[in-house]
Image (spheres, coloured by chain):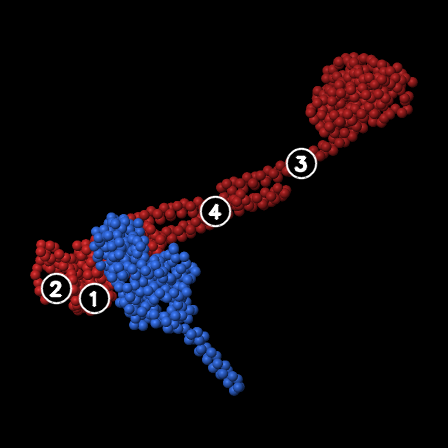
Amino acid sequence: MRNNYTYIFFVCVILTLFLLTPSDAIVEKSLKKASFIPQWSPQAQFAGYYVALEKGIYKKYGIDLTIISGGPDRHPTDFLKNKKADFATFWLSTAIQRSSGGIKIINIGQIIQKSALMLVAKKASGIKTYTDINNKKVSIWEGDFAIQPHAFFKKYNLNVKIIPQSYSVNLFLRGGVDAVSAMLYNEYHTIINSGLDPDELTTFFYYDYGLNFPEDGIYTLEDTFQKDPEVSCAFVKASIEGWLYAFSHPQEATDIVLKSMTQAKIPANRMHQKWMLEKMKELILPENSQGNIGVLKQSDYELVAQELKKVGLIKAIPLFKDFHRKCNSHVQK
Amino acid sequence: MFKNRGIAFKLIFFFCVSNALIFLLILSYNYRFSKKMIEKNVENSSKNLAHSTVNRIEIVLQSVQKIPENLAYFLERGSYTKKELLELLRTLVERNPEIYGAAISFEPYAYEKNSRYFAPYFYKDGGKVKFSYLGNESYRYFYLDWYQIPKELGRPGWTEPYFDKGGGNILMATYSVPFYANIDGKRRFMGIVTADISLEWMRNMVSSIKILKTGYASLLSKNGTFITHPSKKLIMNESIFSIAEERGDSGMRETGKKMIRGETGFFPYKNIYGQECWVYYAPVQSSGWSLSVLFPMDELMEDIVSLNRTVLFGGIAGILLLSLAVVFIAHSITKPLRAFSKAAGEIGSGNLDVELPSVRTGDEVGRLANAFQHMKVSLKDYIAKLTDTTAAKERIESELKIAHDIQMSILPKIFPPFPDKPDTFDLYAVIKPAKEVGGDFYDFFYIDDSHFCFVIGDVSGKGVPASLFMAVTKTLIKGNATGIADPGRILAKVNNDLSDGNDACMFVTIFLGILNTKTGEILYANGGHNPPMIINGGGAAEFLNVPKDIVVGAVAGYAYKTDSATLKQGDSIFTYTDGVTEAMNGKEELFSEKRLHEKLSSTQGKTARDVISYVMEETALFTGDAPQSDDITMMMLQYKGGK
């Protein structure tokens, strides 16, 4: 009898030890920790990253990723500079300025190819073509959002009364300004869902006026990249895979985004996020992209840099090869 | 489908179907009519509810609007120190319970030359009035809606409701009034006076509106965003347009546009809980919001639906009861009918003593029962009589048979009849009666050694009377022929005997001939009979010329002529009754004397027996299946020469 009990006891001990050693733990030892901050609070503008995290794509690429919520008071360039985050997204124009200003950041993936920044006017206010903007009140955001509008007005000799624009489009909706700045994936939809039909509106995409400033790109510090180029490139590849997954599973991707928004205690509107994801697809995989995703084109870079130099925001244009590292990011659609 | 069903089934089916149809028609009419009435009422009551709620909101909003308006007026006209200004602002916030906070926000450097921001703000927090200066690099109030919109539009107005992030997450709206100053004769924008109201009380008020059980009221902002709604996740997050987009409902989007344009309306709508509702919406004019009240249709219809349900159940129960009644009635009709049908079957198979079902009612079934009873009794009587009649008939038939046998027995039937006499002629005769007893006869006998009498006749009518008359006639001929070799005299005597006491007015046609067996001469008389045929040895046949005398037995005292003809050796005389010449075929054609003549013309060399058989066959062939209408009698005598 005694022998039997001893035997059972040992079996139990072995089984318990076996159960306490989860196989995941073995895998996670090989994962590299990394952190990422997008330039705004969770929304479908960053669906690819949240989806890649949720679907375990980063893990698949060997990264144990933490996403830090962005927000109005959180500048991703500061997070990179202060090494609070390994990767960040921000606009190409912002990045060129920071790079020119001496922060050693590099572009490792250009996600958005097509500028989403636009002007929206009511047809009822008599604006049908860009010349009609002359002598009208236009509200524009400050900072990097203002570079394209200013270049646009200058290019077409438009004398415009500029009104500073805050977060809402209510000033435009109430008739306080004739045209308003908007992101295709965000404010434009807000305007539509405030009761203005698309056919009641005139839209001006800077993209169509030779002012395509590709927006969200993935950045990291040069020494972070040097230390472990594989992690950086793995992050870019995983993110792109996340985006492609999001585009082919819009419903699931929207759910994931909404979940992240709820976690961040941000009011979430499904239709708005759905719209945003749809528009992100148009911006990330525009019709002329030929399956290229995440690649920074030198022509785009030169255009943005030239404009920045023209308006005096930078003094010298950083070399493209210093600014940009090309991971093998040519992914077939 | 119904053809073979019972009466009960048909009755129930048609009764129930027609009743159910009528009932459903009435029910649906009733439902539609009451629905219409309710809709009319709900439009009125929703209109009243919406407008009274809007008025309550308007009163508060308008009283709040007065404060910054007056303050702006004061700022434009009066002169004040900073201390006075702050004191005034604090007093306003303290003394006006509707106001959550109030601020006077100046343009950059407009109040003090060296200060970009100047915006004193008093607000309530936990029942106390607190103070702060608005404006810093991260809160540039010049760019906010409550500042920018009235500034750019040059007129006061309410902002979109918003969550105040600093002030304990309350939902608020701000009324902003721009104020100006005259500087160097120019009207210059100086800043904005604001009064904030907490929208909590309004949310509570609107949420407290309970319509029936699940109906509710909801408030939309100028942008169509939900300010109040029973579903919390909609508030400040969804707009009527985003809901319309989610549903792909362009009609709803149009309604939303009407709502934010400040229109009023009444329309049916499926709310976010999937309930069908009636919605009335009306604008809150001063803020541009839109209040809608939703009346859930199913609850409005609840009473009617429950009434209808009761009526429906009542109706179904009624129809079931009716069916039962129909079953009962149908059963009371069909039970005796079934019994009758069974009884009729038994009667049909011959059982007339079957017990008929007893029906005491005086209705159609009762009358049918009486008729049935009467029919049974009548049938029984009739059959009894029929049995008697049949028995009588059978008896008569057997008597007739006997009569026939007797009749046949009185005719000579043995051929050759006189084997012991010299072989001077060949004789053969046959009779084929149409009925059991006929009126035809033939006879032959020797009057003396050299005179042979042969006779053929046909009594008028048929059957027993004719046969009796025939027997009498035959006896009379034989009796009267004794010792007289004159056919005319014999016939005259027979005629007189028959006419005497002939009450039945019967008569007979007779051909009577006497052959002198030595010479071949025939003396003959004819009482209205068919003329015989003479066939010579060469086969040529011709009718014998007979005297045209009347039938025998009709006129007493008539004198019959005697004629004569001579048969040569091999000649024959063929006698017959009208049964031969008037034999009729299916086409009602007669065999005719002409045809008889033809047939007899081809009998050369045949014996009397063969000739008669041949003619018999030919008549049978001619008549085919047609029934024989008259007696057929033939007799033929062939003279062989005197010995």
Same subunit, labels 1 and 4: the answer reads: yes
Farthest right residue in view: B643
Chain B: give its colour.
red
**Quarter-of-image position of residue A221:** bottom left
Residue B292 relative to residue B401: left or right? left
Read off the residue under disc 4: B12
Q: Which chain does the numbered disc 2 sit on?
A: B
Q: Amino acid at mark 4?
A: Ile
Disc nearer the start of the sequence (4/3): 4
Q: How would you rate the neighbour count of disc 3 (Cα within 10 Å): few for under 14, some for 14-19, many for 20 or more?
A: few
The chain letter of the blue chain reads A
Q: Which chain does the numbered disc 3 sit on?
A: B
Kind of element beneath mark 3 = helix
Disc nearer the start of the sequence (1/2): 2
Q: Amino acid at mark 1?
A: Glu
**Foreground residue, B547 or B373?**
B547
Residue B512 relative to residue B248: left or right? right
Read off the residue under disc 3: B388
Give the Cα distance between marks 4 and 3.
51 Å
Disc nearer the start of the sequence (1/4): 4
Labels 3 and 1 touching (C-beta < 8 A)? no
Same subunit, labels 3 and 1: the answer reads: yes
Assign the C terminus of chain B to one quadrant of the image: top right
**Quarter-of-image position of residue B410:** top right
Pinpoint residue A155: horizontal percent, then vertical percent. Answer: 26, 54
Labels 4 and 2 touching (C-beta < 8 A)? no
Q: Is residue A315 above or below residue B269?
A: below
